[in-house]
Every structure is written in C-alpha cells, then in structure tokens.
Image (tube, helix red, strand yellow):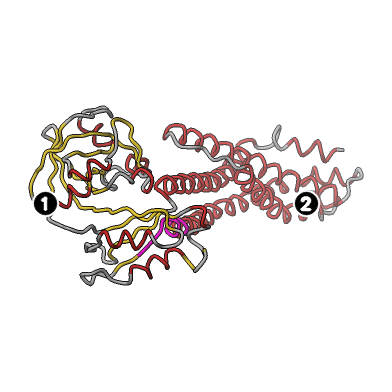
Amino acid sequence: MFFKKSTLVLFQRRNKTRTVLTMTGIAVGAFAVALISQISATGAGEVSGILDNMGINTVLVQSKQANAFAALGEEDIVLLNSVSGVEKAMPLMSANARIDILHKDLSCLLWGINGEAREIISLSALHGRLIDARDTTQGSLVCVIDEEIARKTYGRSNIVGKKINLLVGGNFHEFEIIGVASSGISVLQSALAGIIPDFVYVPFSTMQNLTGRGSFDKIAVLIDSDSGNFSGNITGGNITDRIQKKLGNTDRNGQELIASNLLQQKNQLQGIMTVVTLALSVIAGISLFVAGLTVMTTMLVSVHERTREIGIKKSVGAGNFDILREFLSESALLSLFGSAAGVLAAFAVSFTGCQFLGIKFLFSFERFLSPVVFSLFLGIVFGVYPALKAANMKPIDALRS
C-alpha cells in the first residue's frame, strides 16, 4: 500500500513549485486545444444557422462575371416556374448605392424585390411592413431598411415613416421608409460591420424606372422542399443543373449565366472550417507534446531525488511493478489534473464569450473530454521511461546513493 500513499505525496510534500509549473504547462496546452475546438464548433454552428435563415433552399441565377448585369425578364420567370421542383421564382435587382439621411452619408447595397421576398430570401419586418404587390405595381418610392441603418442614424430601430434620400441612377431620390427589416444575414452585418454592407430594399419596378433598365439581373428561385434534397437528385437530375439547362448558358445579351445554391456554399465553407480547425488543433497539440516532455523531465528529477526512497521500498518488499505503477500513477495524475484545469478554463472562457456576444453555446462532452484523454495518454507515454528507470534500480545501489 505504500506506493499508493507515495503517489499522493507528489501533491503534498514534493517540490510544489515544480509540480504546479508542470501542471500549468499541460493546462495551457489542453486549454488551447479545447478552446480552438469550441470556437470552431460555435462558429460553424452560427454560420450554418445564418445560411439556413437566409434561405438554404434557394437557387440564385445571375451573371457568372462578378461585375456584370444579366438581362433577365418575365419570360425567364415563367420558364423557371415550369421546372419540376421549383416552388416559385422572384426577380431581383442589386446595385451599390449611397444613403443621405440626417446629413449622414452611408453606403449600402440596394435590392430591388417584390412581395415574395419574405418567402424566398428570409426577410421579416421588425417594424412597419415589407414591400408588397401594390408597391411593385405602382413603382412607389418606398423602401425597407436594415435595422443597422436605423441605429446608425437615429439611434433606435423603429424609424418607420421617416424620409431617406437614395442615390439611384446617378441622382438622389426621396423614399419613404415603410419598414425596418431583419434578414438572415443581419447577424453577420452586426459582427462584421464595415465589411458586409447594409441593405436597402425597394420595389424592383421602381429600381427599373430610376436606372432605366427594363430587365432584372438576378432571379431567386425557391425550391420545393417536398421534392427532395435540392442539392442532390430529384426526378430528372440535380435541380440546379435543371434550372441551368432550362435557361441556357447565356442571356439575351450574351452574358454567361450561373445557377448556384447556398447549400453548396455552406458545405464548401464547412469543409474549409474543418481543415482550418484541424490545422489549428494540431498546432495547439504541439504544446501538449511539449508539456509531455516536461512531465518526463519532472519525473526523471523525481526519480533522482527519491533514489534512496526507492531502495528502501525495494528492501522491504516492493517489487519492480509496484515502483513502476507508482511513478506512472504520478505522471498520469500530473497530466490528468493539469488538462482538466485547462479544459475547465476553456469551458468557462467560451461560455462567457458566447454569453457576451449573444450567441448560442454549443456544448459537447466529447469535445472537452478529448484533450483530457489525449493529455492523459501523453502523460503515461512520457512517464514510462522514468518509471522503468526507477523500477529497474537495484536496492543496494539505490541505498548507497
């Protein structure tokens, strides 16, 4: 039983500073691995949720060239509505614009939409209302703005009824704000202010009148979720390919068209995040490996300091296995307690960060347990050599030292 008691001595009488420093090194490595894993999982969950809210079952038809405008018309809407698996298609227009409100000059992305935007691009009204069929038919000078614009200018979210000047078609035009909206991308706009622009929505017919364009440059296609997985195969093949085939490769002005869906982009983004997380975890894991070497060094010093003690234990009946188990237990406990402290710290930091940012905390027992198990494994592996060195000592040589 003396070897069990001796294990506890590690935390009671041995060099406490050395023990604490060794455990701290292990804790730092485990903290880094657990925190990186948690950040990745939380980020992936948020991005996935944002894309889902944006309308993950939507296919966007537009020009393949980044800065070109496709010339799409009502006949293309009719064609797309005839495709099996398509629930409805909606015209879209977009352009960079500027806002003049309360003598503040802001940049924005102007969207021309119709009354079906609520269903297709996941747009909802926080205050007021959205663009409806009457606005589109009349070409009304009305708009719906992002909540961010309202807060940047008036310091509050509800500014329904206020006037706003929009630079469209080379001239400023006065619009009435009929609604303040929340879209699927609002979370990203708040988190990445200055990178993702603010959105303003107007009737697409109004945008056509002010820009002198009789067509629209995009079509948003809502896929019938009951028809099957729209990124995979339904009757007749991939729905995105079917849409592309129906429209052809070019529009009437010769612009090359492309049909893309958010699910493909979501899968690509998740794949990139997985690779990045793995790379960062490997880098953080190196610190655990270094901490394992520290455990070996600590145990070798401990063996040297306790040579005479080992000789006494062997002389009173302790076998090689008893000594081996004693030192392996000590290295395992160093790794276990150190990694557990690091993982608990990572849990606390990630949970606090999620609460502060207002995002959902995704807890996974396996994600926090893995660094502990890996650290424990390293502690045992790096503790084998010192333990074997202690176990193979001859009692007479140990007592003479």
Q: Amino acid at mark 2?
A: Ala
> Which residue, given by chain and number where applicable, does mark 1 sit on?
169
The magenta segment:
259-267
Q: Amino acid at mark 1?
A: Gly
- Expressed as whole percent of the image width and height from the top left, the position of residue 241 reads 42, 68
Q: Which residue is at a point 65% across and 37% down the rendered structure image?
A: 15
- Expressed as whole percent of the image width and height from the top left, the position of residue 345 reads 55, 36
Q: Are marks 2 and 1 in contact (CB under 8 Å)?
A: no
> Which residue, given by chain and number where applicable, does mark 2 sit on?
390
Rendered image quadrant of residue 108: top left
**Magenta stretch holds residue 263:** yes
> Is residue 62 rendered to the left or right of residue 102?
right
Return the residue nearer the eye: 71 or 356: 71
- Expressed as whole percent of the image width and height from the top left, the position of residue 360 reads 49, 37
> Is residue 138 rendered to the left or right of residue 183?
left
Q: Which residue is at a point 42% across and 67% down the rendered structure image?
A: 242
